[in-house]
Image (cartoon, grey):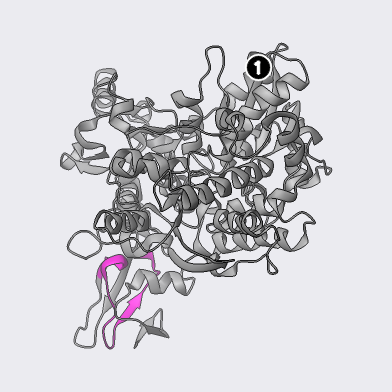
Amino acid sequence: MLEITIDKKKYQADPNQSVLDLLRANSIDVPYLCDHENYADFCQKDSSGTGMSVCRLCLVKHRNQSEKKFTISTSCNLYPCPGLEVISQDQELARLRKINLELLFADHAGLCAFCYKNMDCELQSLAFKYDIDEFKFVPAAYEVTADEELELLYEKMSRRVIDIKNSSIARDSLKCIKCRRCEMVCRNIQTVDSYSKSHKAIRSNVSTEYLTPLECTYCGQCSSVCPTAAIVEKSNIADFQNAVNDPNKKVIVQTAPSVRVSLGEEFSMLPGTIVTKKMIQGLRQCGADLIFDTNLSADLTIMEEATELIERINKKNKPLPMFTSCCPAWVLFVEQHYPEFIRHISSCRSPQMMMGSLIKSYYAQKIELDPKDIFSVSIMPCVCKKYEAARGEFQKPNYREVDCSLTTRELGKLMRLKKIRFSELEDSKFDPALGMGTSAGAMFGSSGGVTEAALRTAYYFITGDNPENLAFEQVRGLSGLRNSKVKIADLELRVKVVHGLGHARAILEQLKKGQCDFDFLEVMACPGGCIGGGGQPIPTSPKIRQARAKAIYSQDDTMKLRLSHENPLIKKIYKEFLTQPGSRKAEKYLHTHYYPYHYRHKSKD
């Protein structure tokens, strides 16, 4: 550690961390847009290992022991050295930062009032802070002739790329400020590498290769780090409102476990605040007819998944290790990049699609309603759930099993549009028909939760007894990779828990080499699992993810029902409809098949 001076105060500094990291760690206010605090090691370095300094906003003055005059440079690629002296704030720095911010605005869309992220945009927030008139940079506001105005507008529009061809993510290059956060996260964290920088000078852009429509895993992490509305989730709010206003539609909503520990952040509540009952009441005020609990279908997933795992171990009819299938971005990752491992993926549908299937089969029969007259909505922490709901496997001739999926961010936006005072809402409960879940289902919201819930029920299926200690804490945590061995009677079950597609790729590369030392693999595409999903409130930092995870597991300590196989509603559904786990009827309504990505999309090619 070195001692350096910042604004005439002494600080201990790690020579391997940038000055920007040190400023941020000590809550010293310096603006930045190309760096991101959650992924500093990746976002602020290019291939040479130095800071990219794209936005030029984190400027500081500095000098070392041998220099008399201060030099101005970006703090993201400035590293501590003995005797370093730094000035982070003065009038000249403020002026230069404002100029660089204006240059970013000059190439930006300049239509904040009509933007999807209006009042929720990092660039706009900095414009307020540095007293920049955003309308100054709209072409019509320039003091130019009509012909010059058209020429300026044409130049901007000729470089615009709008991509709305997939069901999950919408991109608008005119709102891109070339910060390259999306590129760094996609390449270095998720190892999917869908984005890259193209062209030079004024025509430079960050887009897909050859400017083709986006085809990736749709994990949505790019939308979580984008400082503007250049990358956002594809909104389904209008679809929801249209269904609510249709007198012929019965709107049924299901809500994922991690949404209820993060939605409060959209209304200035502390991360990890459990808002389940207020969320339900808010959905009723938004027009939902019924609200069901996705924890129930998570319990169903455990019943089917534990059964499938035991069958794979005993009958060896499918290969080991078995991969979880709850995360659609992970499934898509295997289909796209490792199709040779598709048979390792559990055939179980995700909880979203199990609930969608039950609503339009079991529940539709109970209330004697045509499935096409039900509008099924899911509230999910995940952008890829939109893609999953639109997959061909889940389409029937006359209806979709899940008609639309809203992210946590979209639900917050919808409630604000409805002028709902969230903190003042009365408590409400899930509708009883499909509204009873266990804490095992609730744990799906955090990385390791699926494995822990599956172990509890697998233990019961194998031994006939519940485990003495229900908390398999060895699979909990927020590290990227966790290994564990669990003894169940004479069976030693070897499990791995992974989050982040970069870690998943490393595991699959080992499998390709024949290095397999486990039986069960849980993968969540997003850091931390669903609590860090691409559709969760922004920001989602490690500290925030930890608070959400703590709230998830706190429910396991307080809920009476902690085992999926003891859920009385699950028992009722099997008795009245599915007969038993792994049955033909369960296969029909709760399972699916996966295919290599390019095989499924060959008609498009």
Q: In this view, does 338 lie to the left or right of 476?
A: left
SS for callout 1: helix
Q: Name the residue under label 1.
A: 371
Q: Does 116 appear in magenta?
A: no
Q: Quadrant of residue 474?
A: bottom right
Spot occupied by residue 244 in the image (x, y as percentages of width and height) = 69, 20
Image quarter where the C terminus lies is top left
Spot occupied by residue 377 in the image (x, y as percentages of width and height) = 62, 29
Image quarter where the N terminus lies is bottom left
Q: Is residue 297 left or right of residue 513?
A: right
Residue drawn at the location 27% of the way across and 71% of the way down:
78
Residue drawn at the location 83% of the way across and 44% of the way down:
427
Image label count: 1
Q: What's the amino acid at mark 1?
A: Pro
Given residues 393 and 170, the one toward you in this image is: 393
Residue drawn at the location 20% of the way across and 40% of the way down:
204
Given residues 136 and 498, the one toward you in this image is: 498
Can residue 115 be seen at all in this image of the molecule?
Answer: no
Q: Is residue 419 left or right of residue 113?
A: right
Spot occupied by residue 456 in the image (x, y as percentages of width and height) = 64, 58
Spot occupied by residue 323 in the image (x, y as percentages of width and height) = 44, 49
Given residues 183 and 349, the one toward you in this image is: 349
Can residue 137 be seen at all in this image of the molecule?
Answer: yes
Magenta residue span: 72-92
Given residues 470 and 49, the one toward you in this image is: 470
Pointer 1 local density, CA inside 10 Å: few below 14, some 14–19, many at least 20: many
Q: Does 90 appear in magenta?
A: yes
Query: Please, is residue 201 above or below residue 190 in the view?
Result: above
